[in-house]
Amino acid sequence: MNFFKGINEYKIFLCALCAFAVSVLTLSNCDSKKSDQPVLDAEVHKVEVEEWFQKRLTELKSDNGWLNIAGLFWLKEGVNTVGSDDSNDLVFPKGKMAAKAGFFLVKNTSVQLNVLPGVDISDRGIPITEKIIFHPDSAKNSLLSHGSLQWFVIKRDDQVGIRLRDLESKLIEEFTGIERYEVNPEWRVEAMLEIPAAPRKIDITNVLGQTTAQTSPGTLVFTLKGKEYRLDALEGGKDELFIIFGDLTNETETYPAGRYMYIKIPDANGRTIIDFNKAYNPPCAFTPFATCPLPPAQNVLPIAIRAGEKNYHLDTH
């Protein structure tokens, strides 16, 4: 009896062991189909968003931020005079630049700066008197400076202009932050990137009314409150995608012309995370001298995204 009892117990043990092995293999197969994206604890998520936001504020107030933009001047073909006197084509801030400082010479989107005698202007610390400061084929263009002023050439479509910074801008001192919605993990959602069969471009229009076709790596498909939505993504760099979107909070709670987000490129399964808690205002919310791209029609969501930054009420007077 004891012998047969031992045999039966051994059989039971083997059956249990087999069942365990099957369950492990099943779970392993299921896990291989799941996203590699981590599931964050609510508190950990909140800390992550707060750290991201503090970094954003630091960047806004930095020398390369948007709070010190002091002007945007579109150049015409030929001579464009510059200085603080009102008679110039480009009028820089009074008291921070000579009345007559020189002129920009534009030839087919190539820009040369000629500096008048007695005016101290440098390009990345090196004094100049005459120099081509922008050429479409140049890998690196000039960064000019005089006192607290910095300026450089930007190109938008077939237009070239001068973007001016004042590193001593009062806007930096007066900046008190950006109002936001409370961080809520419900607005952190998993998305699948649908990659087109052939390379695809979508039309993006900026605030100047210029439209350019930009490469779209694919369409992000995600679910919010039980409904499926889609957003066309743009290239955002080596490890990120860039999203320009609008929603029903625009005009009343958030910036009228939509908001921006960067998200990580998808994992091996084509999945990524969209965190609307990191939706932020475009540069145009902080300065009238930006040339922000606007959301394409298909990226205007028919729901209210109450997450991320609210509208920054710029005082332009």
Image (cartoon, grey):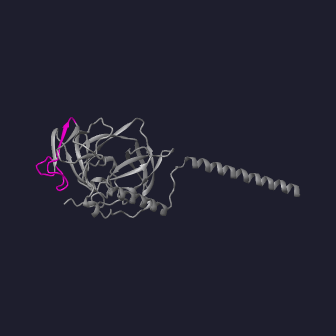
Residue occupying the point 21% across, 59% down:
316
Q: Would residue 94 be counted in the magenta stretch? A: yes
Residue occupying the point 73% across, 52% down:
17
- Which residue is outermost to the left? 87
Coordinates of residue 246 in the picture (x, y in percent) = 32, 53
**Can you tell which quarter of the image residue 277 is in?**
bottom left
Compared to 292, does 213 lie above or below?
above
Q: Which residues are magenta?
A: 84-108
Coordinates of residue 286 in the picture (x, y in percent) = 27, 56
Coordinates of residue 29 in the picture (x, y in percent) = 60, 47
Residue occupying the point 23% across, 47% down:
121
Q: Confirm whether residue 225 shows in the render.
A: no
Give the main secondary structure of the magenta stretch.
Answer: loop
Q: Confirm whether residue 30 shows in the render.
A: yes
Coordinates of residue 44 in the picture (x, y in percent) = 49, 61
Classify residue 61 as left or right of residue 316. right
**Can you tell which quarter of the image residue 105 is in?**
top left
Classify residue 148 as left or right of residue 276. left
